[in-house]
Amino acid sequence: MSSISKRLLVLLLSALTVAALLAGVSTYLKAHQEVNELFDYQLLQMAYSLRDQKSFEHRPTSVSEYEKEDDVTIQVWDMSGALLYVSLHDDPLPRANLSGLQTVTFRNSEWRVFLLTDNMRTIQVSQPFEARREMSFTFALRTIMPLFFVFPALALMIWLAVRYTLKPLTEVADGVASRSPTSLDPLPENNLPVEILPLVRRLNSLFDQLIRAFDIQKRFVADAAHELRTPLTAVKLQVRILERCDSEADRTNALDTLKSGVNRATRLVSQLLSLARVEPEAPPAPLVKVSLNCMVREIVAEQSRIASDKKINLVIHDGDPVSITGEQDALRAMISNLVDNAMRYTLPGGSVDVVIRQNELSTIIDVADTGPGIPPEERERVFDRFYRRQGMDGTGCGLGLAIVKSAVSRHGGTVTLGEAVQGKGLRVIIELPFLPFIPH
């Protein structure tokens, strides 16, 4: 596992090393340029100082210092081209072709040459480039030498700065690591750098979501346990009654009651599982393209026998094919519960109409029945889990509309309750966006 502090140290020290190398190269180039200008000027001064000298029988003492220190070669010719004077040099250079400063190559070595010509003589002062390079390197080395002593101190300061800068991040990591699995209190946000503050806020937001998810889960488990206790107790009681029955008629009645209790408990468990799958906090399922026309027809076909027994006119109104991208199981649970609720509370001889259509912005699922409807003051509460209206029969478990609400929320849609067209009954309108909605 890589470390941010080590990565920063390596990057900063590498940058410092590269900067030192660039500074060294830049210093050497600058020193070399200035040394060249200085020695060029020196060659000119030496040549002009020799121009007025009358005799060259002895080597000029005024230039011997330069010749000795800087490896300077001096040559003097008369007007006829005869060599009048040459400084002590094992292999003197040939006479240059042009007057002034120039660079020439002699025996695989570069030389800087200044040739001065007047009416009486020609003076040539030469110096090898190697001497200039050595002096340039010496000057550059003396300039950057202090960096070699400063470099360890800078490395130590960078290491301390990195540790100090990353200390808030380390404290946040230690604070999270030291927590117990049940500790979801928010992390402190005071005196945090602006770079770390978004991370801490995201963590606190995650903790808040987990708290709400755990609270919903605890409430869900408590409600489920409470709701399951009644039908299971009734089933247990009916089993005992069945065991004590003496006559065949009593056993038949007890068995029918037992079957009814088992069916109610089975439906409750099925609804609980459906609600758990479509909860907003549940893991997202794969998004697929769903044909609502086919899905609604399958669900209506499943309810057709109940509709026939209750003499309810169950009708689908769909025109053009309607498809939506979403979670197939959640959409099926939503539509199944809508149709099931409508069938459950519609009296014999009534009607249930299922309409599927689209507008410019969304897909609409419209289910209307001729049942008792829901008063406006209760239309928000009916979406609560296990809420059952007073005076209704006990066949429902109070989870149908809660499942619908959760499934709609997972798809980023809206659900609205109102009155049917005839002024009575319940009308449920669901609008789902065209684009797939990914819950957070």
Image (cartoon, grey):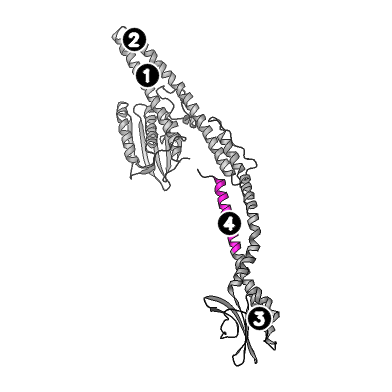
Residue 430, compared with residue 395, is above or below; it is below
Res 276 label? none
C-beta proximity under 8 Å, tags 4 and 3: no
Q: Residues under labels 1 and 4: Cα distance?
A: 81 Å
Q: Depth-wise, is mark 1 or mark 3 nearer the camera? A: 3
The span picked out in magenta is 1-24
Q: Secondary structure at mark 3?
A: helix
Please state which amino acid type lies under the numbered disc 1.
Gly
Of pointers 1 and 4, the one earlier in the residue sequence:
4
* Distance (Cα) linking label 2 and label 4: 92 Å
Secondary structure mostly taken by the magenta-highlighted segment of the chain: helix
Please state which of residues 137 and 192 is positioned toward the viewer in this rendering. Answer: 137
Instruction: Please name the residue that numbered disc 3 is placed on.
Output: 44
Say whether marks 1 and 2 touch (CB < 8 Å): no
Which image quadrant is residue 287 in? top left
The answer to which of marks 4 and 3 sits earlier in the sequence is: 4
Indicate the position of residue 133 as horizontal and vertical percent values.
Answer: 59, 70
Q: Secondary structure at mark 1?
A: helix
Identify the image quadrant of residue 20.
bottom right
Residue 433 falls inside the magenta stretch: no
The residue pinned by badge 2 equals 243
Q: CA distance from mark 1 to mark 3?
A: 119 Å
User: Would you name the residue on which mark 4 appears?
Assistant: 17
